[in-house]
Amino acid sequence: MRCIPTRGSSSRAWMALATLLVSVLFIACREQRPIRAGATPPPPPPPPVESTPESIPAFPWPPPPASATEVLPNSMFEQHTHLSTLGNLNDALIAGLQTTGYFEKSYYAVPRGFALATRLEQISDDGTPKPPPDRWSAAAPHVESFSIKEYLHALLTDNPGYYRVVVFVVTDVPFSESGSQASMSEAQSWLTKGSNTLPASMASAPFGQNTVCTALIYEFSRSAGKEPGLLQPGHLDAHTHLVKSGLWTALGGTL
Amino acid sequence: MKLALKQCQQKLAILWLVGSAALFVLVFLQTTLGHFGSNASAAWGWLLPSILPTASLVVTALFKTSDAEGKIVERFLFRLAFLISLFYLVTVVLVLMLQPLTSTAPADALAHSHVYLGPFQGLVASCFGAFFGQTESHAGS
């Protein structure tokens, strides 16, 4: 018996053949794409971020708005040391801080650099640190050296307390301050939440041509009947803060 | 030993009026010059209940006691009432004047003083009760 192909079976055969051809072409294209001449290979996937022992907490970035800001000239530090790595600048900062009584500090990571936060200190109206132990007290101010004038002033008028946290940001990335204002308790916590030392990997990072140290001054005021709040702008400028704290000269600046 | 009631009342009234006036002036200056910031009402809310009840009692007794000239009172009771009043008023003044020497916020210092000023004020009132209750007439003596 002779089998005569019908019109329907013929079209099914052509459809199957076309499907087979398209599949073969698709597979061939996929296999040939990586070895096609002149084509750039796809970039390797980024390595997963692993928590290394050297990783330190990150500082809020961009930094919260400060009361005052000053970019310190690198020439200040170069009087004492050659700035070839970020560690050199850190050493200069530590030396200056210790000279002026800032023995407690905390390190944070910032893009392409680090931030160094000092402990919250109580300051006088002119920016001079109060003598210890009041210097490191966040309590309301009181009369330290008794004089009739100072006592009457404290007895009758509002006697606001001023408090300061200095954060040195060392990076070659330009930044602006934004975001919500830091509270006094948040600024106090910067001392404890950061790292106690600068990791070796950060310290050995080269000091780039555009790397600068920026001093962010966070100044708080505690008035009667009010919660302590950030002064923005501060009642003193950043340079006055640095000069009155002694940091300016301790870091190599000239008056 | 007995003393004339009228003279005793006058001395107590002078003590309380002078003490109250001094405290009033001090708190007035403090609230006007911003010592308490936005807590000025708390300062007055602390001062007035601390002095007004006893001061009112003393002044009212001075003018309302009938036949005060003819009455006498124990010297001990008068001295007790006078000294404890003086001690109380000095304590109230010290609450205000010592606050700048401490690290306590002004409003907090006032709030903390309620702990000891309340019972102290009760003691002052008891002394006044004894003082006015023990009066007797000259004829009786």
Image (tube, rainbow, N blue to C red):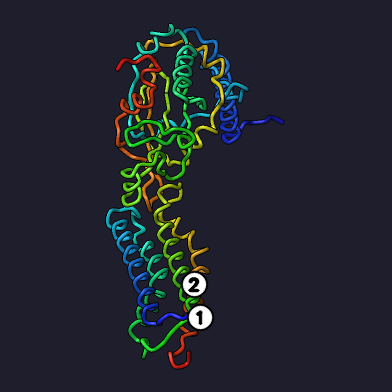
Distance between the Cα atoms at labels 2 and 1? 10 Å
- Residue at 46 percent of width and 60 percent of height: B111
Binning the other alpha carbons within 10 Å of mark 2 as few (below 14), some (14 to 19) or many (20 upward) gives some
Secondary structure category for the residue under label 2: helix
Q: Residue B80: which numbered mark, if any?
A: 2
Residue B123 makes an appearance in the image: yes
Q: Amino acid at mark 2?
A: Leu
Q: Position of residue A62 (x, y in %)?
A: 40, 31
Secondary structure category for the residue under label 1: helix
A171 sits left or right of A12 in the view: left
Reading the chain from its start, which is encountered first: label 2 or label 1?
Answer: 2
Q: Position of residue B133 (x, y in %)?
A: 49, 85
- Residue at 45 percent of width and 14 percent of height: A92
* Chain letter, disc 2 residue: B
Q: Amino acid at mark 1?
A: Ala
- Residue at 56 percent of width and 32 percent of height: A11
- Residue at 60 percent of width and 24 percent of height: A50
Q: Nearer the viewer, residue B6 or A227?
A: B6
Q: Is residue A207 above or below residue A114?
A: above
Which of pointers 2 and 1 indicates the residue nearer the eye? 2
Q: Position of residue B20 (x, y in %)?
A: 35, 67
A194 sits left or right of A229 in the view: right
Residue A180 makes an appearance in the image: no
Q: Is residue A25 above or below residue B126?
A: above
Q: Nearer the viewer, residue A127 or A203?
A: A127
Do badges 2 and 1 share one subunit?
yes
Q: Is residue B119 above or below residue A250?
A: below
| Residue to which mark 1 is pinned | B130
Q: Position of residue A72 (x, y in %)?
A: 35, 19
The image quarter containing residue A57 is top right
Binning the other alpha carbons within 10 Å of mark 1 as few (below 14), some (14 to 19) or many (20 upward) gives some
